[in-house]
Amino acid sequence: MTEASSLTRNKDHWLGRFQAMASPCEILMEVDDRRLARRLLAIAHAEASRIEHKFSRYRKDSAVQRINHSDGQPLVVDEETAALLDYANQCYELSEGLFDITSGVLRRVWRFDGSDRIPATNEVANILPLIGWHKIIWRRPKITVPSGMEIDLGGIGKEYAVDRTARLIAEQSDASILVNYGGDLYVNTPRRNGCGWFVGVENPASSLPLAEGSESIHRFELRHGGLATSGDSRRYLLANGIRYGHILNPATGWPIEDAPRSVTAAAATCTEAGLLATFAMLRGAKAEFFLRTEGVQYWSAR
């Protein structure tokens, strides 16, 4: 193992840990062979790091940064980037513009650090002309981003990494595996005894991740599929008794009103679960109605 990852043996499975995408990452593997566990962990760590390096807006050499610094000129992207842009376009259309990967520029005025620093109305208004996926010209494999605008794939990257990791691990082993990247999960198959992995839904009132001792508000058995959570437990502002969550309305530049503290959704894949949880949060007071209408298994906390 590298210094950046660790592997420990529990009663009936191996637990691998590392950091990536600004999140604690875990791989639970129901295998007996330590060498196999080491190999699977290495695959997971490498894939999570690859996706982070390729799509992070914080890295100057990332695909996202090359797009954001294209100065209004058409740029040809590779197949993987194109697939994510297609998905982002689909999300934009399905959400009627609420899920917009160009809205990341609002971070220039919103800093959700738990303080009471709310931006001025004119500061937010000045950013709005730089938001709007409909202003982007996306003609696969070419994308044209108007000068000053940006894209940010952070809203779909972690869930995509979970599913990609699970797929790569499945090519090496048919053992039951749980991939957990910062609370976004996927389980490939039931365990040897026919049961699933027991997971907890984090209490949004806690400031700690589950892995660091936070209490859970719901525990259940995940035998197969994905799970993802969207919420404001660690990214918010508090001013004049009002809590401002970090999920913003791209049309107004302000936090979505009356949204739950957190929504956890289950689906066939982690990517789909993440989409459903985020869509629900974007609907504010109608979050639970949306999830019920979709027939989704979910947990909501307000």
Image (cartoon, rainbow, N blue to C red):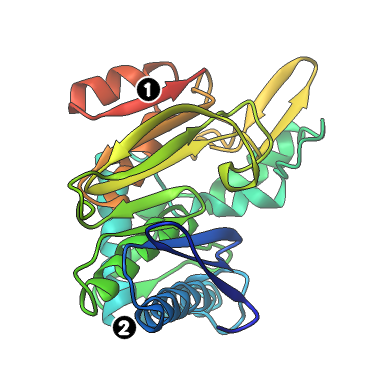
Residue 78: mark: 2
User: In the rendered view, does 255 fall on the left or right side of 159?
Assistant: right
Residue 282 seen in render: no
Question: Mark 1 against mark 2, which lies toward the viewer?
Answer: 1
Residue lying farthest front? 11
Q: Position of residue 150 (x, y in %)?
A: 53, 63
216 or 165: nearer the viewer: 216
Residue pointed to by mark 1: 287
Q: Position of residue 8 (x, y in %)?
A: 53, 67
Residue 23: mark: none
Q: Position of residue 208 (x, y in %)?
A: 66, 40
Q: Residues within 10 Å of mark 2 (few under 14, many from 20)?
A: few
Kind of element beneath mark 2: loop
293 or 29: nearer the viewer: 29
Q: Amino acid at mark 1?
A: Ala
Q: Residue at x 31, y 83 (%)?
A: 78
Q: CA distance from mark 1 to mark 2?
A: 35 Å
